[in-house]
């Protein structure tokens, strides 16, 4: 009866959707050592306790049923040595959970996302042995995703994430091979739209930002008048900007920073004397450090928002005190007010590059400022300066 109650308890916990305030564990009576750990995030993971200080991760509930977790636990308890090291017969999910995840989290900049991508995109392969997964099978699944409307660029990234697991496996299992080396990357058309701001659109965007700040400032003034008549403590006066949105937008327009680079920007990477921003490789999509000069407007924005002894992030979320994860709502409100609802935040980066090219900046210079490792990415802006191309061709007619 106690065994049945234990199994019932761990089974219920495995499918429950609760998010506890603190982590907790539910243990099974049989096999001894099998347990389920539940995190405040709601994630649930099966483990096998081998000793007082040693555990082997079985895998997440949902990927593993309780029956599968019990079977895996029996195998681990029978041969702990094989369970703790990479095995030739490992399934994809076993290898990812027990070996690749730690490597990815420690060594890859986007390790957590890479692991999540493998588990979500290649779900059909998770229960298969690594040795049984073939290029033909992966190609079939790849084709299925393309037919579902997924872009070739995205599918290439899906393949790269899975190939990373196999590459790590090959390092640990000398006789192993990576079946994905047989797959060629899909051709990706360089047809990303280049949306930049026309002069009147830029004026409207800036006017909308100013109106937003002015409205917030007026609201704060009225609120303090109301509070003063009631002898309430006054709210602090707003500074040059009502919040983070205007300085973020203006800085993006003048530096070409990606949104993620902007969110992770720290004061330690801003040099007011040399008038530069350093984008660290660890925060850059291209994994390269680059230095961006600050023009007059960008420098003025940073000077206006920097307080005495400021450190840490330049832009801190008022909710978490850490990095922003998005500014979608505020951005939608601003672009609607400016009557440019089709402008994405990433288009501010396009605008930065486009304006540079149209003002005569060499493509190589723009490439360095944007942090493109491949010049083909920057070359798309060349069409915005047709007179430069025409002048170059005209040289052929000079005797």
Image (tube, helix red, strand yellow):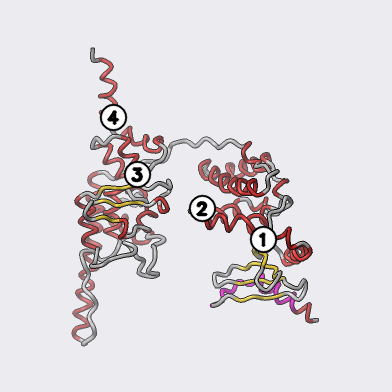
Q: Earlier in the sequence, mark 1 or mark 4?
A: 1
Q: Earlier in the sequence, mark 4 or mark 2?
A: 2
Q: Which residue is mark 4?
A: 386
From mark 4 to mark 2, how far is it between C-alphas? 41 Å
Q: Which residue is mark 1?
A: 63
Q: Quadrant of residue 49?
A: bottom right
- Coordinates of residue 147 in the picture (x, y in percent): 59, 42
Quadrant where the image shows the C terminus: top left
Q: Which mark's residue is nearer the viewer, 4 or 2?
A: 2
Element type where label 3 sits in the image: helix
Category of crowding for the residue at label 4, using alpha-carbon neighbours closer than 10 angstroms: few (below 14), some (14–19), many (at least 20): few
Residue 148: numbered disc: none
Q: Residue at x 34, y 61 (%)?
A: 330
Element type where label 1 sits in the image: loop
Q: Residue at x 64, y 40 (%)?
A: 139
Q: Main secondary structure of the magenta part?
A: helix
Outermost residue to the bottom: 231
Residue 108: numbered disc: 2
Is residue 67 on the magenta stretch?
no
Q: Which mark's residue is nearer the viewer, 3 or 1?
A: 3
| Image marks 3 and 1: residues in contact by CB distance under 8 Å | no
The boundaries of the magenta stretch are: 6-21
Q: Which residue is mark 3?
A: 370
Count of marks, rendered view = 4
From mark 1 to mark 4, how far is it between C-alphas? 55 Å
């Amino acid at each position: 009866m106690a065994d049945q109650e234990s199994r019932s308890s761990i089974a219920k916990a495995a499918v429950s959707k609760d998010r506890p305030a603190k982590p907790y564990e539910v243990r099974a009576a049989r096999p001894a050592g099998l347990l389920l750990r539940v995190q405040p995030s709601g994630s649930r993971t099966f483990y096998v306790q081998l000793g007082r200080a040693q555990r082997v991760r079985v895998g997440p509930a949902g990927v593993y049923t309780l029956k599968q977790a019990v079977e895996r636990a029996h195998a681990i308890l029978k041969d702990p040595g094989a369970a703790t090291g990479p095995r030739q017969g490992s399934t994809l999910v076993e290898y990812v959970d027990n070996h690749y995840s730690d490597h990815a989290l420690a060594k890859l900049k986007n390790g957590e996302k890479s692991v999540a991508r493998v588990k979500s995109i290649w779900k059909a392969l998770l229960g298969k042995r690594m040795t049984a997964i073939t290029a033909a099978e992966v190609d079939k699944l790849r084709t299925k995703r393309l037919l579902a409307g997924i872009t070739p660029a995205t599918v290439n990234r899906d393949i790269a994430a899975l190939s990373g697991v196999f590459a790590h496996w090959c390092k640990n299992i000398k006789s192993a091979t990576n079946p994905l080396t047989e797959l060629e990357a899909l051709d990706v058309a360089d047809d990303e739209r280049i949306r930049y701001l026309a002069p009147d659109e830029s004026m409207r965007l800036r006017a909308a930002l100013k109106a937003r700040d002015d409205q917030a400032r007026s609201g704060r003034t009225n609120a303090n008048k109301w509070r003063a008549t009631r002898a309430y403590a006054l709210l602090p006066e707003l500074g040059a900007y009502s919040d983070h949105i205007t300085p973020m937008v203006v800085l993006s327009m003048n530096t070409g920073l990606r949104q993620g680079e902007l969110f992770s920007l720290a004061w330690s990477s801003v040099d007011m004397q040399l008038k530069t921003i350093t984008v660290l490789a660890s925060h850059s999509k291209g994994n390269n450090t680059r230095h961006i000069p600050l023009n007059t407007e960008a420098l003025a924005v940073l000077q206006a928002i920097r307080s005495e002894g400021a450190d840490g992030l330049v832009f801190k979320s008022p909710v978490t005190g850490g990095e922003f994860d998005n500014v979608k709502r505020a951005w939608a409100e601003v672009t609607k007010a400016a009557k440019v609802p089709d402008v994405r935040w990433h288009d501010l980066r396009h605008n930065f590059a486009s304006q540079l090219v149209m003002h005569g900046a060499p493509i190589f210079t723009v490439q360095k400022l944007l942090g493109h490792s491949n010049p083909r990415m920057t070359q798309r802006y060349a069409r915005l300066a047709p007179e430069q191309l025409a002048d170059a061709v005209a040289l052929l007619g000079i005797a």
